[in-house]
Image (cartoon, grey):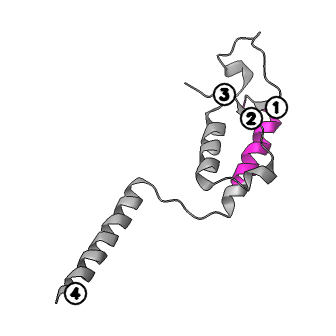
């Protein structure tokens, strides 16, 4: 199921967010419906002011650019296989260090 809406957040506030929260917001923006014509929302359904509903709006583009700009200065967050490889390398390094200490 697609996300219905996201609140509008200022770029100044986004800078204070953790990297994971920014990534989740970026994912949420990507999940929004492309346009009202392609949405399954009812035409009479009320829209909350201060929220973004569709990708085809200027608010969505500004919010997307703001999140991308906030993430630009952040470090890379490793996921899945990359983290697994890092853990394995660390474990190998630690076990070889222990063997040297025992000698």
First-in-chain label (2 vs 3): 2
Residue bearing the label numbered 4: 100
Q: Residue farthest to the bottom?
A: 103
Q: Examine the image and state in which quarter residue 6 appears.
A: top right
User: How far is mark 1 from mark 2, CA to CA?
Assistant: 6 Å
Label of residue 33 in the image? 3
Disc 3 and disc 4: Cα gap in Å? 58 Å
**N-term-proximal mark, 3 vs 4:** 3
26 up-or-down from 102: above or below: above
User: Which of pointers 3 and 1 lies earlier in the amino acid sequence?
Assistant: 3
In the rendered structure, find residue 50 and report the number of the disc placed on it.
Answer: 1
Quadrant where the N terminus is found in the figure? top right
Task: Report if the CB atoms under discs 2 and 3 are less than 8 Å apart.
Answer: no
- Mark nearer the viewer, 4 or 1: 4
What secondary structure is the stretch in magenta mostly built from?
A: helix
Q: Secondary structure at mark 2?
A: strand
Q: Position of residue 102 (x, y in %)?
A: 18, 86
**Image side of residue 7 versus residue 21, left or right:** right
- Is label 3 in contact with label 1 (beta carbons under 8 Å)? no
Q: Nearer the viewer, residue 62 or 102?
A: 102
Camera-nearest label, 4 or 2:
4
* Residue segment shown in magenta: 54-68
**Image-based side of 93 in relation to 5, left or right:** left
Q: Residue at x 73, y 21 (%)?
A: 36
Q: Earlier in the sequence, mark 4 or mark 1?
A: 1
Q: Which residue is mark 2?
A: 7
**How many other residues sit within 10 Å of disc 1, few (<14), some (14-19) or many (≥20)?**
few
Residue closer to the observer: 47 or 96: 96
Sequence-first tag of 4 and 2: 2
Would you call the spot at circle 4 few (<14 residues within 10 Å), some (14-19), or many (20 or more)?
A: few
Whether residue 19 is situated above or below residue 35 in the rendered picture: below
């Amino acid at each position: 199921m697609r996300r219905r809406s996201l609140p509008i957040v200022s770029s100044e506030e986004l800078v204070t967010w953790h990297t994971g929260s920014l990534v989740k917001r970026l994912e949420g923006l990507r999940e929004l419906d492309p346009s009202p014509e392609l949405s399954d929302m009812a035409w009479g359904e009320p829209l909350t002011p201060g929220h973004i509903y569709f990708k085809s709006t200027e608010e969505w583009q500004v919010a997307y650019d703001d999140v991308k700009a906030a993430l630009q200065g952040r470090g890379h967050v490793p996921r899945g296989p990359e983290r697994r490889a890092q853990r394995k390398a660390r474990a190998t390094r630690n076990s070889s260090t222990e063997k040297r200490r025992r000698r």
